[in-house]
Each structure stands twice: as structure tokens, then as C-alpha cells.
Amino acid sequence: MKKKELTKGKEYWRSLDQLAETPEYKQFLEREFPEGASDCDNAWSRRKFITLMGASLAMAGLAGCRRPVEKIVPYVERPEEVVPGIPQHYATSMPFGDSAYGVLVESHEGRPTKMEGNKLHPSTGGASSAFIQAQILGLYDPDRSKTVLKNGKPKTWNDFVLTWIGLHEKFKKNGGEGLAVLGGAFSSPTTSRLRSVFQKTFPKAKWITHEPVSDRNIYDGLKVAYGQAVRPQYAFDKADVILSLDSDFLLLESDSVVNARRFANGRNVESEQDKMNRLYVVECGYSTTGANADHRQAVKSHEVGAFALSLAHELKNLGVNIPGVESQLVPQKKFKWVKEVARDLKRAGGRSIVVAGRRQPAAVHALVAALNEGLGNAGKTVLYTKPVDTTFSDRNGLKTLANDIKGGIVSTLVMIDSNPLYDAPADLEFATTLSKVSTTIQLSNYVDETSTSVTWHIPQAHFLESWGDARSYDGTVGIIQPLIQPLFDSVSDVEMVGLLAEGKFTKGYDAVRKTWEVILRGGNFETKWRRVLHDGLLSDSASELVSARLRGTAVANYLSDNSLVKNNQAGSLEIVFAASPAVYDGRFAGNGWLQELPHPVTKLTWDNAALLSQSTAKQINVKNNDIVKLDYRGRNLELPVWIQPGQAENCVIVELGYGRHGVSKISDAVGANAFGLKDSAAGDFDSGLVLTKTGRTHKLACTQNHWSMEDRPIVREATLEEYHEHPNFAKEAVKHPPLESMFNEPSYAEGYQWGMTVDLNSCVGCNACMVACNSENNIPVVGREQVIEGREMHWIRLDRYYTGNVEDPETVHQPVLCQHCENAPCEQVCPVGATVHDAEGLNTMVYNRCIGTRYCSNNCPYKVRRFNFFNYTSDYDELAKMAQNPDVTVRFRGVMEKCTYCVQRISSAKITAKKERRDVRDGEIIPACQQACPADALTFGNINDPGSEVSKRKKHSRNYDLLGELNVKPRTSYLAKLRNPNPEIKKA
Amino acid sequence: MAQIFPKWTNYLGHIAVGFVALKLIGITAFFWYFGSPEYLDVGYRPIQPVEYNHKVHAGDLGIDCRYCHTSVEYSARANVPPLATCMNCHKLVKPDTEKMQLVSASWKGRDAIRWIRVNDLPGYAYFDHSIHVSAGVSCIECHGNVAEMDIVRQAKPLSMGFCLDCHRNPELFLRPVDQVTNMKWVAPPNQQEMGQLLRSERNINPPQDCSGCHR
């Protein structure tokens, strides 16, 4: 296949297979559905299928004559606020490690069905993330722990309460000697209060906090710099120049929703005169943040510190005083564009940000604090707050605990939201360690790896079914209120800690109220409390800013004790442990939506892999899907290889959170557990890895080649400079003959005409829209094998294109959903009129008419139609079906489906407007994807109304129609992407 | 050579074709009618767990529909009333009669009564009561005159054709909004003009696109 010349001569490619033009890639491209996709061959022979179908048809013929009897079960007494058919919304908070997100949850007659961000809450501002969106499915996971277990046998919560009262008496007498608690990080005022009661009651007891993925390094580094525990808050919207040192602040670092929003604000280009920020990324792997960079360079994780030090020296050479940077060794290695970044940062004059990732050691963070101080960013774009009611992961807590247990000091260990047998570093050998404790108690939401080895296992309530409270990253305190009674015999963290501390069971509601009586003191409590329950938060309760001076000498001493310039271990491979954008640290491994969500950059689903650069793969002669053995510190792990363009050489990245065992149907046997390689002495990256090829293969379910639109000019981008010169570059990118149609074209000049714009310059590629769409539109999870066949059902997908050379490509993300073409090619080929246009310009899909010819999908230039090869949803557990949106039809086997622009939301808004005798207001209809988007990349509305936001965006000079040259007249259009490269840096 | 088949056998083929065609038409017509909601569903009259009589309540006593079906004006669903609504009166009115036994027992046991759905739309059709009521479509149009039914039965086919009859010509079915629940209202002779007027006054344009009802 010959590649055409694209915009500005750039070539875009989706995968290494495409670059190499392998037969597999060609086959995937040319066949509408991959070979075998239409066959039904797993465990079901065609003959068996037809036999059974015949039999069930005969039965259906008889049963069909009888009308199914449906029952109506009204309330005995209807709760005042519940009206059947009108969903309710409650504001609550989603706790997430040592922070939380403010959310708004939709509930249909007491059944929560959809998560949204809470507009009033600064942590989300109405937007959300893939993690937030997926929590609904987590609530209804049928594999959640259901009963209290004692040594594996069912017991009741009361049995445990009685046991604990006995233990409480015993430990009260000896001051808690032999008692230890291992908990996850939290940011809850009530839990904090109860924890201090616990510590007062049992002064000799130990409380260890452990999070497998945490900001520990950041806090430690800042503590060195400022002498106190502070938390950085970044105003990315106010920065002109941003340097990320191995920080994926747009997706996986703390407070990512806010970060993405602010970053996109700083890049928002409304007119040709607007400016935008410039992002430099120095990182090891290819992160979502790296994909948004204007300049990105791949260095090993070890060298990031050296880069920061080189930068500090360059800045000093430019006359910028960086406190603490004095006589440290100047790194020998010469990095690309250090000088240029230094000049750019200096020019920004306090309007820049240097941010380092949580994997980097504390010394890097101390140095970064000094850089921000020296550049004048501290107090302007980088603010520090004092965290309250928050526990952080202890650096050596788990190791100390293991030693204590081995020393026989611990007789009773309580684990709250903690699963050390899965996620403790392997060298601590927690499985044997734990057996030395006589009584072990665990509160967890699954019967997990640890649960089978504990004395007492207590099911943990989901946050949507319990009372609590939580502070978000900026310290704003929010309430956690239940949307539903606990589905199982479970208790919340607050109730568990309350029982531990007080020796008696207090209901979560009472415990939370008691805390809030102090928080809301002064004035009428009941009024304020009701306000908090309504808003979901206490407004203006963010943590106070800390105005401390940076301690230059402390930083200098720390930097000389912890050298950032590592010995160059040539040839030695580096191993990096990274949190997964799908399952994080394993806590979301049971969530089908997240497991099936393609990784923002690799596009892998349902697996973790050993990510390598192409040259590293060549060295050991492996290709994609080859299983390699990772030997590290005497332990080994087998993982399939995935070659990641743009990754640093001699470095292997493995994602945490996979390889669960005996936990749930979804999570088991997916990937391998990278915690099994981790070492407590080393950090999140280390050298000394040895890779060997095993000769076996494992097919990874990667979606990067799926739904390809071939080599057409799909993505259009330019630099800011080019844009200033040629504002209409996107429209001019394609020359085509005059567009004339052979069909009669309706005018669509009357009434509402729906349309959408997607701003590629705002989209950061975070995947929130995909999960939001899953949740809103009852999109089924199909499983790993089906994804390999190319049958994933996502209505909106995020295409990721690389451009440039294999070792250092740039990346563009492009959300693609049904374009709702006015001259829709799908409609012209449907033999049964199952896909037709409505008067408002929607390309509608009539499931009942569809007979499954799939001609429409064949003829769709955008590849946005999805076919139900199986009856995916009917196989769901009854409990999981509760997560479904009652306003959207659940599709059956054999029918096509696709994005509807959330027609249920359109209908509902139109009905409301009609009843109020007015027109639908602009912004009243927000599709699920737009609502979830933290970057405001999507805009939906009436294109017939010149004043609507979408009309304004469509008039923008960057606006272009995807494949507009086909004269399909898509209603969805795109605003071209801009990059803002530093003119001083020449492209290699 | 003598002909083996007489001449009339030439027409056998035509007759056979005609017969097959007739049969096909007959089968189609059979299922067209006997398989239709109009034949299958109209008149469906299940025996409810409680012998509730709409004729007594809505007809003889003249209780407005909305006394029980409270959400009909503002929700997609016209709710079946909670037991508490029944007990508003029946705490005092005939609380111990035989017919009231299940109701009283359910009230005391706080257990809901399981009614059998009569007017049932398929799950993929999204009907919104409130918008129809606010447009001036009477309950009678779809439910028949419930005030005259001892036992509620399905009065109309509720098929897609039935819906579209009205969506295409709404003026034939509209009435003033305050008369929506009036079971005794009689359409004026000039219904067409009045309907037209109501339609333009309230800007009523019922959707005829699939997306109007199917999502």
C-alpha cells in the first residue's frame, strides 16, 4: 500500500505492523470483519448451534402465543422525593487513596446507574475520569465479598463484634501491645477522628499505612525542601511553559481530572491571536501526558534526575538562582534541548511549572521544588497546601511490620482495605509472615488473595452504599452518602475503624454526624448539615496555603547525600513498575469496563505486557506477543512483549494490578502480577533486570489496528506558528472536486438540528468519554477473545496515531464516534430501512428492523458501527444488570448498534422544554461523553441556532469535516490540533 | 397421435399458481390480523389480586384519575398508587370487608400488592405520559373509558400503527388540557378546527421519526 501525502507532509501510523505493512495488518484493514469473526466456533459447533436454535425456535413458537405476565409492585408508602420515572441525583464523594473526587450519582427508583462529576466540587467541576465512571459496575459486581467469614466459614457481623469486644478489653488493659493495623491511605475526617481515638485507647498499638502506588516520594521531597508536610497544587492553566519529569499528571498522578481541565484551558485557542502553553516531557515510557507534549524525549527513569540537575545548572548559567543547587556533580550525559528548556523557563518569568512524577525518588522532588522556587513559580503556578485528616503511605511501614511479625511482636493484625498477599513487595514474603500472627482480621471488598489466609474476613461496603466523608486533593471536605442499602452483609471503613477504636458498633451515619458536628460548629447544625448533604461538600473548605520558605541548605545537603547522578550501568536493563490506566494498582481489576478499555497509548486491553522499545526488542530478538522471562533480584515473571514506539532504550515497563488470583471472574487469569517482582528496598524502578526469550507466545488483545480508516487525512494538525500564517490549514488540507450528490438531499433548515464538535487540541486522550458512554448506553463487555477478533463494542473510540520515526514519534489522539452524516452511506445500503435519518439530523438505528446484514458497517467510512455477534448482555449476572440505564434499549444478538448522540437525553430535554412551553436551551442537552470530558473537548448542540456554542465552534477556522471530501456531510466535525514547539529546537 | 391429456389440463398450471398465491395471501392475511395486537391484546383483562373496581371509584364516585395516578402530569410513568393512597379513605371506609382483606393485610404487613400489568408497551418503546397529558391527549385515547370498566381491560391495540394514527393527525384527538381526565367529555362537532387551533397554539408537532419513541 502506498501512503499518500498528508497534512504538512506528515505521515500517520497506528502500529508498527502498519509501518512494516505486515500481512496481518493488511488483512485486518481490508476485511470488514477479520477472518472467522462471523463464525461461531468457540466450544460451539455450527451443527450444535443450529440444533439448539431449531429446538428453541419450536419452543418459542408456542411460548410466543402467550402474553408474558408482568407485575407492577407499587410502594406501600412512597418516599416523598421518589417519583417513578424521574431519576434522582445525589452528591457524594468517591474516595481514592489519600484523596477523593466529588461526584453526582443518578439513581432510578433507588438504583444508582450513572456517575458524573459534581459541578460544585473543585475536584471534578462536573467532569470525571474513567475510574469514576466505572464505579457503578464495581458496585454491582456479583463477585464482591458477600458474607463475614471465620477461617473460611460463614459467620455474621455480630459474631465478629462479640469477638472484637473481647479483644478490645484485652488490648485496652495492655495498651495495645501486640496489636497492629495495616490500612490503605485515606483522607476522611471521621476515620481520622476514630483513628486518634484508637491511638489514644491503644497507645502501644501500631498503625501502618500502605498504598502500593502513592505520592510518598513527593511528600518526602517536599518535606526536605520546606521542613513540613505539604502538598503541591499546580495551576496548569496559568503556566506558559510546563516541564514534566516522568509525570503523567494528565492521567495517573493525583488530581488528574483537575490537571487535565487546567492544562486544556491553557491550550484553548479560540482565535488566531490566542496563545497556548508549551509542554515538555522527559519520561521513560510513553504516557498520556507524553502524547500531549510539544517536545518529548525518552530517557531511562534513572536519568530523569540527572536531566533535572543538568537543567538546574543551565538555569544557574543563565543567572537564575536555584536554591540548594551548588556544587553537585554535573551529569556527564548531555541531554537534548536542556539549554532551550532552560531559556524557555526563564523567559516565562514565574509563569511556568516543573513537575515530577511519583515514581521519581524524593531527591528529584526536592530539586523540583527548588527549581520552582528559583523560577518564581512557587506561590504563583505552584502552590503548597497543608493536608489535613489525611494519612499517607508509610515509606518503610510494610517492612517494619513484617519484621515485627517475624520478631513475634504482633499477635493481632487488622487489615483495612489492604491486600498484602497480593501487593506487598515480594521480598517480604508476606504469605509466610502472615501465618505467624495468631489473629488476623481483614476488611475488603473481595474475597481476595489475603482473605483465604486470615482468621476473620469482613466484607467492605462500597462507597455508594455507606456513610462517610472524604477530603479531595485540595482539601475540600465532602460527604459520602449512600445511594442504596448495602447489597451484601458488609460494613464501611468508618464503621470498622469505629468498632476497632471504641469497642462498640456505631452506625456510619452517627459516626459521621458526630465528626461534622465539630466541622460545622457555630450556627444551626441541621441547616448546615442539610446543605452539605445537598451540595455533597462544604464549600470553601480547601486546605490553607502554606507560605513557607524553601530551605536551600537542606536541599543542598539532601542532594549531596542522595546523588541524582547514577552510575551509568551500561547494558543493564531497567525495570519500571507503573500503575495501570485500567486497573490502577489492581483495585479495579474486577471491573469489565476498565479491563476492556484500551490503554490510552499502547491500546492494549485485558492484559499487561513487558513494554520495550524497538531497539531493545531487537537486541534480544523478540517481537510482539513473544513471552519473555523477566529475572530480577532472584525472582522471575513471564510476560508477553509489547513494543512501544518512543520508549526509552534498555528499559522494560510492567504495569501493576494484573494477575489476580481467585478474586473474581473478570480479574482472574488476566495478565501477570508484577508485585511478585517488586522489592521493598528498591523503588518503583531499578536496574539489574535480565530478559530471556521463552519461545512461547501469548496473543495480546490490542485494538490499535481496529476500525482503521486507511491512509486518509484523518488527523489534521499544525504548529501554532503555521496556524497564525494559515488559519484555514485544516480545511485546505484536502483538495477535492465540487461536492455534488446524486441523492435528493433534504434541507434540514427547520427546527433543531443536532451537531457536535470535537476539539483535538483539547482532547488529552484520557478515555473518560469511553467509559461514560459504556455506562450511559448499556454497552456490553465482550471479553478478551472477542476483542482479539475485533468485536469490541465501544460506540466512541479513541484513535491513537503516531507520526515521525519509530524511536521518537509524536502522538495524536482522536475520539471517533458516529458522525451522523446527512448523506449517510450506511442508510443507502440497508436493505430493510433499519438505519434512517430523522428530521433533526440524527442518523437513527432501529434495532427491531435490523436483520444483521452488516452492509451498513461495510459502507461506513468512519467504522463506527458495532455488531452484536452474541447475546452479550443476556449472559450478565442479574446483579450486574442493575447497572444498566433504563432509558436505553438493551440490544440483542444479530443487530447493529452505534452512537445515537445520546438520543434519550435529547428526548428528555425536548419533553421538558415542551412541557414548559419553550425551546430547548443551548447546553441543556449534554451527551454522556461531553459531560465526562475534563478537557471540554466535545460540544453538542443545535447547529441551526447561530448563537449556540456548537455553531460558534463550527465557524472556527480550525474546523474541518472528517472525510468531508466524500460529501457525506457529517454533523460531527473536528477542530484541528495545534502544537506549540519551541522554535529554537530543531527536530531531529 | 392421440393426446394423452385433455386440453383443459393446460390450465392446471395456472390454477396451481393461483391457488398457491391465494394460499400465501391467506396465510399473510391470517397472521396480519390474528397476530396483530388489535386481535391479540385488545380485551386483555387479567384477574387482579385485589378486586379493585375503576367503575365505582372513577365512575360512580367521580374521583379524578390524578388522585391516584399522581405522577402522570410530570413523569414519563403514570404510577400505580402506593397502598397509602388507598388507605387515605379505606382506613375508615369498609376497612374489614372481604374485598379489602388483602389490602388491609398488605398495609399491616407493609408488603406491596403485586398488580398485573394490563396496558403493556414493549421495552424498546419509550412512552412519556407527561408530554401527552400536557399536550391535551386524554387518558381515554389509549386506555378507553376506564370509568365504565368493572375490571380494567386493554381497550386499544397500543401498536405502533395505533400511535402513528394520532401522531400523524393529532388535531383529531386533542382537547383542552383541563379536560384530559374528564371521562364524560364529548368531542365537539368542530373537533378538526378546534384541534387545529389547539395544535398551533401549543406548537404540537408529534414526532413521526423512529427516534421519537425508540432509543
Image: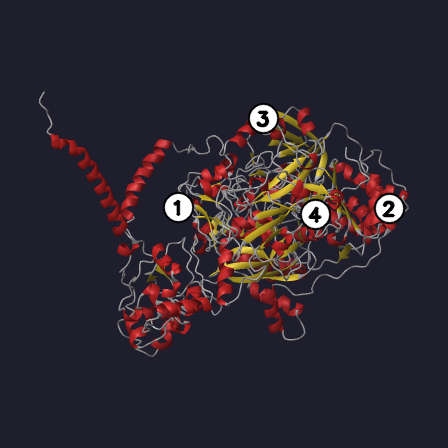
How much space separates mark 4 and mark 1, taking CA atoms?
Answer: 46 Å
Which of pointers 3 and 1 lies earlier in the amino acid sequence? 3
Q: Nearer the viewer, mark 2 or mark 1?
A: 1
- Residue type at mark 1? Arg
Residue at 64 percent of width and 60 percent of height: A121
**Label 2 or label 3, whichever comes before in sequence order:** 3
- Residue on which disc 4 sits: A249
Mark 2 surroundings: few (<14), some (14-19) or many (≥20) residues within 10 A: many
Marks 4 and 3 on same chain: yes
Q: CA distance from mark 2 to mark 3?
A: 54 Å
Residue underneath mark 1: A849
Left or right: residue A895 compared with residue A523 = left
Q: Circle 3 marks a residue in which chain?
A: A
- Judged from the image, the secondary structure of the residue bearing numbered disc 1 is loop
| Image location (x, y in percent) of residue A260 | 68, 50
In this rendering, the label closer to the viewer, 2 or 3: 3
Vertical placement of A695 versus A978: above or below? above
The residue tagged 2 is A556
Closer-to-camera residue (A44/A570): A44
Q: Chain of mark 4?
A: A
Residue nearer the viewer, B89 or A567: B89
| Mark toward the start of the polypeptide (2 vs 1) | 2
